[in-house]
Image (cartoon, rainbow, N blue to C red):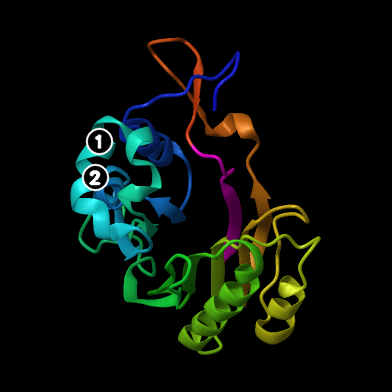
Amino acid sequence: MTGKKHVRQNRDLFREFAAFLAAAKWDLALLQEVPPRWASRLAEATGCSGRVALTSRNWLRPVMSPIARFRPHLAGSWEGGCNLILARNSVPGLEGFRPGSEITDFRKSTLTWFPERRVVSMIELGCGLAVANFHASTGTGAAGDVMRAARLADGRAEGGPLLLGGDFNARPRSSDVFDRLEGEFGLAGITSEGSIDHLLTRGVEVLEPAEAWPPARRDVPDPDTGLMIRLSDHAPVVIRIRV
């Protein structure tokens, strides 16, 4: 993003993104379109246990990742991507560990291979909460991916508490998929009628409903220009729940 207040950077922004993520208050983070080379480093930087599911364009990663380290715009999405789930205070034996936050199971399934590979990754926490993270296809393929992800997550949860989150690439105001999710799986809690990023839940107490951060909250200052760097083209969505 460029303009009077923002600068576009053609360099690796891992440090800025990791610092931004580490400073935010959360227990679980569901990320999509993450460079795979960032995954373990983000887990380390945030003191988390992480689970990775590779998605599309990873066959060129050995060639494109070195390029992306120095000229990200040149590599673009051809560096490859992954979905990443991070769980804080989830490593037994480490300072701050909270019983119930540990990841007890991890599974991943491919939703579709064409035109790009889309994957749902699923974890279960010690407290019994099942969590699924995915990035749906664009256009007409979105609803099918969403429903497949929900069916897999529902099977993993076995009727228990469930959080289904990610980029649905479908908006409630123009898609009936959210009514179907609530009717078939009991998953509810859209971010807004115009949003494509959602955290849907069932079987938990929602203390604060899902809400997208305003654009300025994903900006960080660039020390060289004094302008702002926008770290993502999607606003983070947050929800507060009790299991």
Residue at (43, 52) in percent of width and height: 33
Q: Secondary structure at mark 2?
A: helix
The quarter of the image holding the C terminus is: bottom right
| Whole-percent x, y for residue 126 in the image | 38, 74
Residue 35 seen from this side: no
| Whole-percent x, y for residue 20 in the image | 42, 35
Q: Say which residue label 1 marks.
A: 69
Q: Say which residue label 2 marks.
A: 65
**Magenta extent:** 232-243
In the rendered image of this protein, does residue 206 appear above or below residue 210? below
Residue at (24, 64) in percent of width and height: 92
User: Which quadrant would residue 27 be assigned to in this image?
Assistant: bottom left
User: Which quadrant would residue 164 be assigned to in this image?
Assistant: bottom right
Q: Determine the CA span between mark 2 and mark 1.
A: 6 Å
In the rendered image of this protein, does residue 14 appear above or below residue 183? above
Residue at (25, 45) in percent of width and height: 64
Left of 59 or right of it: where is 207?
Answer: right
Label 1: how many Cα within 10 Å (few below 14, some 14–19, many 20+): some
For badge 2, the amino acid type reads: Ser
Left of 16 or right of it: where is 94?
Answer: left
Label 2: how many Cα within 10 Å (few below 14, some 14–19, many 20+): many
Residue 23 seen from this side: yes
Residue 142 is inside the magenta segment: no
Left of 100 or right of it: where is 158?
Answer: right
